[in-house]
Amino acid sequence: MDKLRFYLEFHKSTLVLSWVFSVAVSIVTLSFIVMLIASMSAGPIIGFLYKEMSHKNEYYFYANNGISKISLILVSFFLHVFLGVFLLLIYLYEKHS
């Protein structure tokens, strides 16, 4: 159960920057769907790059708790995609009803 909490904590730390980038893209393109696509693709990459540059030593904390850097990135990326697909489905459902 602790590992799940660590994965979610890492994901939350990348989520903020990802959504800021996605909202900026949305404002430029004036499209909610483009924002969701950016939040599933470029947003996580921007978040991971920021994390790699500014909080590089934070990965040692997760490694000491038995979580590899690759698994952190993969789980967080899949959570970004899952959240984006979920919001896209809600948007499309509301648009067609």
Image (cartoon, grey):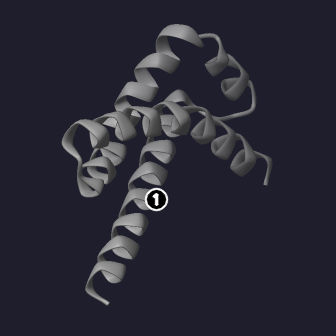
Q: Residues within 10 Å of mark 1 (few under 14, many from 20)?
A: some
Q: Is residue 96 above or below residue 52?
A: below
Q: Residue at x 26, y 85 (%)?
A: 96
Along the line of sight, the residue nearer the viewer: 9 or 72: 9
Q: How many marks?
A: 1
Image quarter of the N terminus: bottom right
Image quarter of the C terminus: bottom left
Element on which disc 1 rests? helix
**Left or right placement of residue 93 versus residue 75 in this view:** left
Q: Residue at x 35, y 30 (%)?
A: 45
Question: In the figure, residue 59 lies in which quadrant?
Answer: top right
Q: Amino acid at mark 1?
A: Leu
Residue 36 x/y as whole percent: 33, 53
Residue 58 x/y as whole percent: 66, 17
Q: Residue furthest right?
A: 2
Question: In the figure, residue 87 lies in which quadrant?
Answer: bottom left
Along the line of sight, the residue nearer the viewer: 58 or 22: 22
**Left or right placement of residue 52 versus residue 40 in this view:** right
Q: Residue furthest bottom?
A: 97
**Left or right placement of residue 61 versus residue 24 in this view:** right
Q: Is residue 61 above or below residue 44?
A: above
Residue 10 x/y as whole percent: 62, 35
User: What residue does disc 1 label?
Assistant: 83
Q: Is residue 56 above or below residue 11?
A: above
Residue 6 x/y as whole percent: 71, 40
Q: Residue at x 36, y 64 (%)?
A: 85
Question: In the figure, residue 25 lies in which quadrant?
Answer: top left
Along the line of sight, the residue nearer the viewer: 8 or 84: 84
Q: Residue at x 44, y 42 (%)?
A: 74
Q: Residue furthest left?
A: 29
